[in-house]
Image (spheres, rainbow, N blue to C red):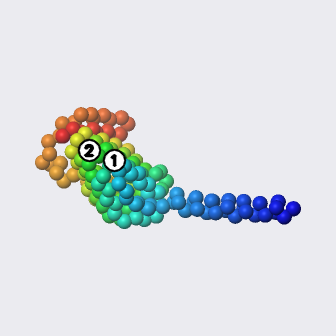
Amino acid sequence: MRLITKIPSALAVSTSLLIATGSDAQAACVLTTSAGNSSYTCDSGTSGPLTDTTGNNTLTFPANGTGTINGDVTFGDGADRVQMDSGTLTGQLHMGNGTNTLLISAGQITGDVTQGDDVDTFVMTGGRIQSCPRAIATTVFSWRTVSSSRGLMMVTSRR
């Protein structure tokens, strides 16, 4: 009889620990860099600047999130991707050279956005950005793809 009463108690304690730790790990904007390809998610809370200049990096602000990054986000050469469906970046977004993709449907970037050299993709269906690169006035672009549908414009450029 004692064995039966002790097992449920142990299970109840371990189950409550799993529930408590699981919810804390997912609700954050903790951006810790590592070597190589990295994926970052900012769904709630606040983080400082993010610099990761190695690998192919991904930054996601998921839909219905409230995450904020205070400072610049800087990626290096590589196929970097930013998916912004919520949140705020109070700084500049520097995606570096390489084949980069910026998709923004909601949220806000308060600084300049630069995607670097190579073929890049920019799709904006909502949200706000401060401006595109300052160098655009002195750079010659040959557009590889420009398409428009229902108020959405997608531009893929080749420099």
Nearest the viewer among 79 and 151 is 79
Image x and y of residue 28, in percent: 48, 61
Is 55 located above or below residue 22 in the figure? above
Q: Quadrant of residue 153?
A: top left
Image x and y of residue 89, in percent: 36, 59
Q: Residue at x 73, y 63 (%)?
A: 10
Q: Relative to 105, is 19 on the left or the right?
A: right
Q: Which image quarter holds the C terminus?
A: top left
Q: Residue furthest left?
A: 138
Local crowd size for mark 2, using a 10 Å CA cut-off: few (<14), some (14–19), many (≥20): some
Local crowd size for mark 1, using a 10 Å CA cut-off: few (<14), some (14–19), many (≥20): many
Is 64 located above or below residue 70 in the figure? above
Q: Which residue is disc 2 drawn over?
A: 98
Q: Residue at x 47, y 51 (%)?
A: 63
Q: Relative to 65, is 100 on the left or the right?
A: left
* N-terminal-most mark, 1 or 2: 1
Image x and y of residue 91, in percent: 30, 61
Nearest the viewer among 38 and 27 is 38
Cα distance, mark 1 to mark 2?
9 Å
Q: For residue 82, say whether it is visible.
A: no
Q: Which residue is disc 1 drawn over?
A: 56
Q: Residue furthest right?
A: 1
Q: Residue at x 38, y 36 (%)?
A: 150
Contact, mark 1 vs mark 2 (Cβ under 8 Å):
yes
- What kind of residue is marked 1? Asn
- What kind of residue is marked 2? Gly
Give the secondary structure at mark 2: loop
Image x and y of residue 107, in percent: 40, 54
Q: Residue furthest front?
A: 3
Give the secondary structure at mark 1: loop
Q: For residue 23, say whether it is visible.
A: yes
